[in-house]
Amino acid sequence: MYIMAIIETTSRQFRERQKDFFELADKGEKVVIRRGRKQTYVLTPISEDDLYFTPEMIQRIKDAQQEIKEGKYISFNSVDEMNKYFESL
C-alpha cells in the first residue's frame, strides 16, 4: 500500500532545493510551500493538455458560439430558476 506524504517547506528552503521539490512533485508527492505566515502554495505538475486547447476543444467552443448566435441557448433570470431547471433534468 502506498501512502502519499505531504511535504511542507518554506519559500527559502524551496529556493535552495528546487530540483528536489520538483522531483518529489513529479513522483506524485504533495509539496506545500509556505511564504510568510499567510501565503501557501501547492506545487503541482501539469501536462501539455492543461496548457493548450486541443483542436477538438476549439471546435466545441466554436460550435457553442454558433449556437448562441442562432439563439439556441437557455437564459435564466435568477440562480433559483437555474437550479430548478437543472434539477428537472
Image (spheres, helix red, strand yellow):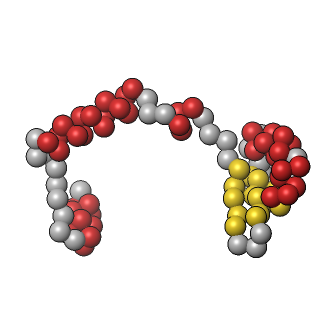
Vertical comparison of 52 with 29: above or below? above
Which quadrant is home to the C terminus? bottom left
Q: From this viewpoint, which residue is outermost toward the top?
A: 55
Percent position of residue 47, x then y: 60, 35
Q: Which of the 4 quarters of the picture holds residue 8? A: bottom right
3 vs 41, left or right, is: right
- Residue 1 visible from this viewpoint: no
Locate residue 60: give its quadrant: top left
Looking at the picture, tell me which residue is in the foreground, 72 or 36: 36
Q: Which residue is drawn at 75% across and 58% down?
A: 32
Residue 42 placed where, x, y %? 69, 55
Q: Can residue 7 be seen in this view?
A: yes
Is 83 positioned to the left or the right of 19 in the image? left
Q: In this view, does 80 lie above or below 30?
A: below
As drawn, is 87 to the left or to the right of 2? Answer: left
Nearer to us in this view, 44 or 14: 14
Of 4 and 16, the residue lying toward us: 16
* Residue 88 relative to residue 41: left or right: left
Residue sitting at the far left:
70
Residue at 49%, 34% (x, y): give it: 52
Q: Name the spot of residue 86 as percent of width and height, x first.
A: 26, 60
Residue 44 coordinates in the image, percent (x, y): 67, 47
The residue sitting at 80% across, 58% down in the picture is 11
Determine the residue positioned at 17% across, 44% down. 68
Q: Is residue 83 above or below residue 14?
A: below
Q: How many labels does the image show?
A: 0
| Res. 41 image quadrant | bottom right
